[in-house]
Image (tube, helix red, strand yellow):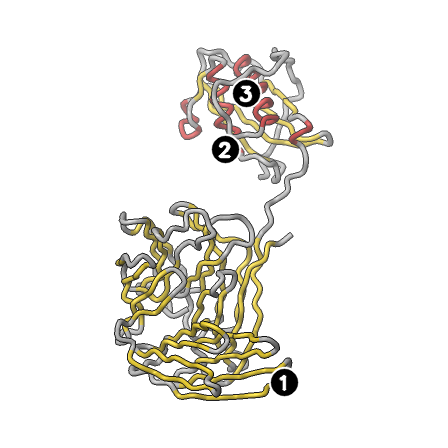
């Protein structure tokens, strides 16, 4: 958050004519995306419909699910019916051309105590007819939705002074927390629950900003590096903690999959990325960027999603340029290892300003489309920054609680719900 920014009415005629039906399922030459029991039911119903409507007349087919839980897509049933009716010699026209059809066939996916049913209403001029085909019991088990991921937020640090980033190092029984503020790096060492050491070291930013950008990287329990604007500060225990800040000449910030070039005068990244093989990728300037993790299929670094300076997220694939845009996203995006599924997933902040509460939404990217997964995680204040963890399983989030005024450092991670 950096830029302000069916029930379809079913009427069965009282007189149901016995229609001629095939005594066995007729194989289809077309491949169907439906489960086999549904495909067999569709074929049987198509025979009944084609028998009732003579080939000289055209028909349209509309399919509705009145169970609100059938494990098939009504559109897929309609498409399969049209294909099978044509196989039987019938003629169908699209629903959009319904007025031009001689017969408007209405099919409902219904249910009784034995399972699912396909029910067709065939309004003929001389006498309306109905056809009912049960779906075999193998397909009537209740639909079980896929598990949905749940986001969890664990507050690990709170303080009244602004926080830019934070990190934790664990060595034997000792735990060290590094808290990066706009002008200093705080070190808190704990032995169990007891704090045994507190150190504050001033850092040089070289550039000032109302919204300073900074990031911590912990090499090992005794070495930490902080990037602040155009400065790089290296801290080490030798044996006491000391820190040395120098100008970050190449202005590159190491990230999990590439080095990002930072523009300290504009307080954003230039869009120039240097990959691990020294190849350079040039994208529009951005506040944050993400690419598929190596453990996700297709995570080769050739796809990038960037949160642009204009408040829009852009998806780039290879050298083809921006393939699509996403509106309504905030300026912080992070790739994260999927807790459910195996597709490329992202944590995305909201698009409000610094006076509003914020949220984090998990998205899944398939091709050029992004869909929200699960419910958003509400945060009681604006999110100031969000960085990926080294293993990609969580994100470091800094926010400011509007109710307490405290700056909160949190770990956000997904789990696969029941």
Q: Is residue 325 above or below residue 175?
A: above
Q: Residue at x 29, y 81 (%)?
A: 207
Q: Secondary structure at mark 1?
A: strand
Residue beneath disc 3? 123
Residue found at the very far front of the displayed protein = 238
Q: Secondary structure at mark 2?
A: helix
The location of residue 360, given as percent across then percent down, is: 49, 63
Residue 194 tag number: 1
The location of residue 273, given as percent across then percent down, is: 30, 61
Using the image as rendered, state which of residue 198 and residue 55 is in the foreground: 198
Q: Looking at the image, is mark 1 or mark 2 nearer the viewer? A: 1
Q: Is residue 265 above or below residue 153?
A: below
| Residue 119 can be seen, yes or no | yes
The location of residue 103, given as percent across then percent down, is: 48, 20
Residue beneath disc 2? 75
Q: Earlier in the sequence, mark 1 or mark 2?
A: 2
Residue 100 tag number: none
Q: Earlier in the sequence, mark 3 or mark 2?
A: 2
Using the image as rendered, state which of residue 184 and residue 47 is in the foreground: 184
Q: Is residue 303 above or below residue 48?
A: below
């Amino acid at each position: 958050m950096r830029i302000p920014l069916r029930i379809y009415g079913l009427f069965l005629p009282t007189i149901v004519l016995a229609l001629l039906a095939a005594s066995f399922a007729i194989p289809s030459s077309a491949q169907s995306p439906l489960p086999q029991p549904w495909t067999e039911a569709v074929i049987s119903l198509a025979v009944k419909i084609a028998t009732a409507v003579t080939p000289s007349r055209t028909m349209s087919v509309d399919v509705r699910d009145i169970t609100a839980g059938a494990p098939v897509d009504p559109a897929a049933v309609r498409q399969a019916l049209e294909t099978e009716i044509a196989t039987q010699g019938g003629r169908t026209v699209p629903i959009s051309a319904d007025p031009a059809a001689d017969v408007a066939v209405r099919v409902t996916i219904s249910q009784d105590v034995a399972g699912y049913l396909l029910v067709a209403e065939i309004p003929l001029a001389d006498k309306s007819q109905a056809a009912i085909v049960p779906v075999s019991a193998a397909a009537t088990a209740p639909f079980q939705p896929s598990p949905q991921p749940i986001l969890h937020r664990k507050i690990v640090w709170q303080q009244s002074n602004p926080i830019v980033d934070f990190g934790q190092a664990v060595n034997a029984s000792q735990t060290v927390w590094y808290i990066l503020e706009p002008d200093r790096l705080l070190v808190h060492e704990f032995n169990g629950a007891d704090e045994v050491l507190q150190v504050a070291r001033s850092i040089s930013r070289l550039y000032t900003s109302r919204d300073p950008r900074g990031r911590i990287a912990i090499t090992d329990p005794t070495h930490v590096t902080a990037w602040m604007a155009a400065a790089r500060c290296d801290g080490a225990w030798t044996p006491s903690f000391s820190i040395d800040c120098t100008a970050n000449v190449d202005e590159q910030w190491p990230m999990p999959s590439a080095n990002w070039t930072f523009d300290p005068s504009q307080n954003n990244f230039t869009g120039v990325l240097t990959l691990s093989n020294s190849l350079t990728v040039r994208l529009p300037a951005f506040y944050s960027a993400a690419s598929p993790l190596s453990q996700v299929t297709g995570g080769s670094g050739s796809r990038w999603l960037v949160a642009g300076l204009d408040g829009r997220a852009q998806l780039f694939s290879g050298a083809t340029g921006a393939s699509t845009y996403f509106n309504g996203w905030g300026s912080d995006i992070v790739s994260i290892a999927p807790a459910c599924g195996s597709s490329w997933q992202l944590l995305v902040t909201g698009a409000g300003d610094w006076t509003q509460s914020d949220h984090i939404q998990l998205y899944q990217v398939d091709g050029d489309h992004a869909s929200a997964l699960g419910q958003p995680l509400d945060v009681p204040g604006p999110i100031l920054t969000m960085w990926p963890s080294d293993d990609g399983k969580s994100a470091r989030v800094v926010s400011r609680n509007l109710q307490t005024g405290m700056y909160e450092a949190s770990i956000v991670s997904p789990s696969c719900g029941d």
